[in-house]
Amino acid sequence: MRRTQLILAIVVLWALSAVLQTAIDPLRKQFEPKVEGLFGKMTGLPTEYIFGTMLGFREVVAGALWVRADSFFHEGNYDAILPIIRLVTWLDPHNLDVYSTGAWHIGYNFTDTEQRSDRRYLSAALKLLEEGVENNPDVYDLYFEMGWMWYDKIKQGHNAVQWFQKAYEFPDRPDEYSPGIPPARRHMVAHAWEKAGLIDQCLLTWQDILQRHERYYESHKKEYMARVQIDVAKHNYTLTDLRQYRRYLKQPPDTQPPIDVKFDVKVRVVEPKIIEVSGTVDLGNYFDEQMQKMDYRPGRVDVVLRDEGYKSSILPTDEKEAGEVWRQKVFTFDVPDVTIMQEQIAIIKGKFKRKIDMSKDPMMYSFKAPRYVVTVRFNPLYAPPQTQDRIGWRGEGLTDKRYLRLDKVTTVDKDGKTYTVDVRRVRKHLLLTREQLLSGKGEAVEYTGLE
């Protein structure tokens, strides 16, 4: 009799635990146990994981799954990580490492055989980080990771500013085991303002960073890095201030008169699904003799190939035209069935040239559309400092008779205040057909359907 009652009690408690766990989990409704997408299906969990979650051990199960995901990463099996990321964030929405590392996998590690990232997944990486911020608003980490994705991977400093600012608002972390933001990471706000072309805001931020470092040093004088951070902030502030003076304030400024860069681009199909991109960006012979001997590379051009009519502000060539179409309404691993290729080519002695092979990755480059637009541009905001010494942060020192474009770049800070600057870029659009790409023959013609 007692045994029967005990078994009955265990069953009741087990059922009650399952009901309560389901009721208190706000992410339950978002869970999809069958995820269909580019990389196949996930049909369910092993039995031990199912019973573990129902008995209230979700964090434990999430940790075990994440260890398994890490093994997939080290094996190079990135596709298998996708469903595990979704499962772990459902089981434990406060596991910061899953959001940050998962977004890194999605944004950086899905590549073709030439190590070019699959840009179709960037919106998923951003949405995963957004979800992480919503579930963990009281820690700096995911605000910073979102800023870094915009700053480094997408290379749009103006979209990184507000995320770095939100991380900046957290208190200093006194040691690696305490909450708060490591003091050195505050520097990224100033760097993002600079990449957005807003130098006054950059300098003001460096001043505030320096004051914070000095206050921190007063109570941490025994820490070697506390002194180093002060020196770094002073150096960066002084250097930025000097560059602003030489590039804009002194008479005449170093950025004048503008250089005619004689920008032009040719795109040829040399083999099936292989194109050759070549052209000129003549930034002048103003570098010193030592740099010329080193074949100094004054910058890179961005190259994007995508289906005609497809736009996304995540692409460097479309940020002006596309607005915020990158946003996913609901986080999903499904990606648009389009062909997108993005590459950078170094400028050497005023010229650039590279073959781009898209023949080995049919899942990434399906070439289903009838026509494709290839856009090539040079962006001064992300040019090396030595190049910006001559052309300026925003391209004030460059011009071109045919392909100069004056773009409005708008930064929105964490408080909703907007800053807009004019950026002078050179950009050319060309058109290829599917027939040309598949046959391995043909030369792109200039495309006038975009500015």
Image (cartoon, grey):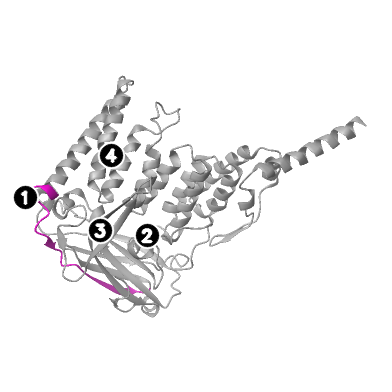
Magenta extent: 248-272
**Residue 379: numbered disc:** 3
Name the residue: 51% across, 40% down: 136
Give the percent coordinates (x, y) of residue 93. Answer: 56, 43
Q: CA distance from mark 4 to mark 3?
A: 24 Å
**Quadrant hosting residue 374:** bottom left
Pointer 1 or 3: first along the chain: 1
Q: Do residues under tags 2 and 4 come within 8 Å of each other at their CB atoms? A: no
Question: Looking at the rendering, in which quadrant would you find the N terminus?
Answer: top right
Q: Nearer the viewer, mark 2 or mark 4?
A: 4
For marks 2 and 1, give the CA distance: 47 Å
Callout 2 touching callout 3 (CB < 8 Å)? no
Density class for disc 1 (Cα within 10 Å; few <14, some 14-19, many ≥20) is few
Q: SS class of the residue under badge 1?
A: loop
Which is more N-terminal, label 3 or label 2?
Answer: 2
| Residue of label 2 | 114
Type of the residue with mark 3: Asn
Residue occupied by mark 1: 251
Question: From mark 1 to mark 3, how far is it between C-alphas?
Answer: 25 Å
In this view, the residue in front, 379 or 268, is: 379
